[in-house]
Amino acid sequence: MHAQEFAVADYRDIPYVGNRNAVWVIAQVHLLFASFVLGVPIFAFLCELIGYLGGDKRYDKLAKEFTKLLTASFGTTAMFGGILVFLLLVLYPKFFGYLTEVFYPTFLFYVSLFIVETIVLYIYWYAWDAMMERKKLHLFMGFLLNVAGIVIMYTADAWLSFQASPVVLAPEVTGWQRYWAAVHNPTWNPVNIHRLIGNVVLGGFMCGAYAGVKYLSAQTQEEREHYDWMGYVGNFIGIFGLLPLPFAGYWLMREIYEYSSQMGITLMGGFLSWLFILQAVLIGTLFLGANYYLWQGLLRRTEGGIKYQKYITIMLVTLLTCFMVWMTPHSLVASVEEARKMGGSHHPLLGVFGVMSAKLTVVNIMILTTFISFLLYWRANQQVVVSWAKLAKSFEVVLFVVVIIAVILIGIYGYFVPAVFRVKVLSVSQVLLVLFVLVSISIMTALMLKNAKMTGVMKWGNMTVSSQYALVLNAVMVVLLMTMMGYARSASRVHWHIYGVMRDTSPNAFTPALGPAAALMSLSAFIFGMFLCFIFWLSALSEKKAKPVSAEGVIATKAPAYFHKVAAFVTVVLCVYTGIAFSLPQRASLPPVEEKLDLATIKSDKDIANIGNKIFFGKGQCALCHTIGSEGGRCPNLQGVGARLTREFINETLTKPQAYVKLDFDLAYPEYFAAKMPTINKPPIDLNPQEMLGVTAFIQSQGGKITVGIEELMGAGATGVNMVSSVVVPQISGTEMASSSENKDEAVVPQNP
C-alpha cells in the first residue's frame, strides 16, 4: 500500500481563536520577555560596574538581585519562543518556509548563539559569590552575556525588518552576499537601535516597578530605604534611556519613508494615523509619571526640598501643555454636516496643532523639561566648589533658553516649507540641537559635581504611596508602548506577509481597528505581567525567611498586603487603555477582493471614470496624499487637473513617478524635490492594466475630456478588476461616517498628521 498524499496547506486555523490572534499574542509575549532578558542584563551589568568603580556594595547587591530573576525569565522566554516557532510551522507553513529559505544560515547562527548565551548566563549567576575576589573576570562574563544577547536581538531583527523592507536581489547574487543583503535591509539598523534603547528603558522601569511593590510591602525602615533607593536607580536608568528613545523612533520612521512613502503614509496618514494619538497618551503619561517620581524625590528626600516647588509647577504646566498639543489630531472624523460647519475635516484652530511640525516641537520640549527635572535632582544636596561654576551655570541657562526658542522657531518655520524639507532638514536640526544640550550639559554637570561639597544627605524611605504607584504605572506604559509599536510595524505592511513580495491570502488578512488591536495588546501585557509576577514570587521563595527586626531591635509588624491592590491598579490601567482605544475612530484595513467587471454594464466614459473613482479612493490609496477640491494634502490638489495634463503625462506620473521633478521656488535657494509616489502598477499597490485605465479616466474627468474608451478597456487583457472594500468606520457619536470609497465628496481622509 502507498501512503496517501496530502496537499500542503498555505494556512491552518485554530477554531474560535484564529491563527492570527494566536500568533499575535504568543509572539508579543515572547518579544516582551526577550526584551526583559536583554534589558535586565544591561541594567545588572551597569549596576555591578558602578558598584565596582565606586566601591558601593548596594549596586552589587542590586545587580545580583535582578540577575537572579534572569534564570527563570530565560526559560520562560525560550518556552514562548518554542511555542511561536511551532505555531508558525503549523499555521503559516508557506510563509515560514519562505523565511527559512531566505535566512537559513541565520537560523543556525541564532541557535548557536542561544546556547552560548545560556552557558554564559549560568556562569555569570552561579559564580557570582565565587568570583567576588576576581571581580574583573565576573564583569567580563557580564559583558559577554550582553554581547551575546545583543547579537541575538540583531539576528532576530533581520527577520522582522525584512518583512517590512525586503530587498530586491539580482539573479546573479548568490551565497553569503544574498544572505547579508537580506539581513542588512533598509530598516534593520533603525529597528536594532530603537529596540536596544527600548530594552534599556524596559529594564530600568521594570526594576522601578519591582522596587515600588517591595517598598509598599516593606516591614522595616531598612527595607523601605533599600527599595526606595532601588526605585530611584531604576527610574534613573529608565529616564536615561527614555530621553533619546524618541530620536531613535524618528530615525526608524524616516527610514520607512525613505524605503516606501506609501508605507510611511499608511502609518502617519492612513488608517493607522489615530494610532499615534494613542501613542501620545502612553508616552505623555510616561513622561508625567517619570517626572512626578523625580519631583516627589526632590520634595521628600532632599533637605529644604520645598524650594523646588515653584520650578515643579512650571515644569508641570509645560508638560501638560505639550501633552495636549501632542494629543491633538490633525483630521477629525466627522459627519458631512459637521465637516461643512468646520469648513473641512480640519478644525480651523486645533488642526494647526495636529501637524508634525507642532508634534515634533512639543516632544523636544518635553524631553528638555524632563532633563531639567533630572538635573535638579542630580544636583540636590550638593554645593559646587569649582572656580568656573558661576560661568558654567550662566552658560547652561543661556543654552537652554536659546535651544528652546530655536526649537519653537524651527517648528513654526516647518509650516511654510515642503514636507520633505521639514522631515530631512528641520526635524533633524531640532533633534541635533536637543542632543547637543543633553550631551554637553551632562558632561559639564558631571565635571562640576566631581568634587562637590555635600550640604545634606538623601533621606531614603520617606516616599509617598502615590510615588510607588507612579513607578508601576511607568512600567505598564513601557510594556503597552512595546505592544503598540509591534502592532504598528506589522500593520504598516497591511495585507502583506512580506511587503510587496508575499501577499497574505488567509481569511485573517485584514488589519484590525484600534479597539480590537488594543484589546489584544492589553491581553499580551496582562499575560506578560502574570508570568513575571510568578517569577518574582518564585525568586522570593528561595530567600531566607525570618522575622524582620528594625535597627532598634524591635520586631516589625506585618506590612499591608499591597500586591492585590497593585494587581487591581494594573488591571484598571489596561482596561482604561483599551477603552480609550475603542473610543477613537475605528478604521480597519481590508485586503483587496476580486470583483468581476461586467463590461456590458459600461455604457459611457463616465462609467469608466466611476471605476477609477473607486480605485482612487480604494485600492490605489491615492487619496492618502492627493485631495480633490481642498488644500492640505501631501501632493497636488487634483481638482481641474484633467484640463491641464495630457494622457501621456498622466500615465508617466503613474508608472514612472520619479521621472517627474517638482521645483520649489518658495525657498531662498530653490531645491529639487522628487515626487514621493509609488509606482502604482507594481507591488505593493499593483494595479492591473484595466485599473490603470480606470484611474486615468477618473483623473481626466477632473475638468478634462475622458479619452479612455470601452473598446480600449476590453482590450486591456484582464477579465477582472481588483477593488478594495470600503474601510470599516462604525458609528461615532451616533452619526454614520461616509466611506471614502463610495462618495469622494463626503469622504473624510486623514491628512498629514
Image (cartoon, grey):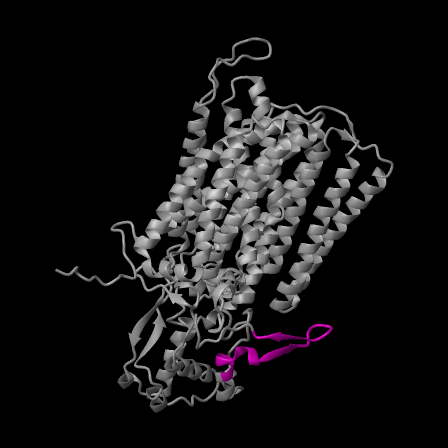
Q: Residue furthest front?
A: 1
Look at the picture and state if 127 lies above or below 328: above
Left or right? Give the position of 508 relative to 264. Answer: left
Can residue 670 be found in the magenta stretch?
yes
Query: Do we see residue 341 in this rendering?
Result: no
> Is 670 in front, or is 139?
139
Whether residue 210 is situated above or below residue 599 in the rendered picture: above
Q: Is residue 226 left or right of residue 373?
A: left
Residue 268: give x, y in percent of width and height.
51, 61
Residue 294: x, y in percent? 63, 35
Q: Quadrant of residue 503?
A: bottom left
Foreground pick, 35 / 660: 35
Residue 510 or residue 204, whichever sits in front: 204
Counting the numbered discs, the total is: 0
Q: Position of residue 429 (x, y in %)?
A: 69, 59
Q: Which residues are magenta?
A: 652-675
* Coordinates of residue 611 in the picture (x, y in percent): 36, 79
Looking at this rendering, what residue extends furthest in the right direction?
A: 387
Q: Is residue 137 left or right of residue 724?
A: right
Does 194 sit left or right of 733 as displayed? right
| Quadrant where the image shows the C terminus | bottom right
**What is the residue that sits farthest to the left in this orientation?**
1
Q: Is residue 414 magenta?
A: no
Residue at image coords 58%, 18%: 221
Give the vertical position of 181 relative to 514 (above or below): below
Q: Quadrant of the N terminus?
A: bottom left
Can see residue 199? Answer: yes
Q: Residue at x 53, y 45 (%)?
A: 148
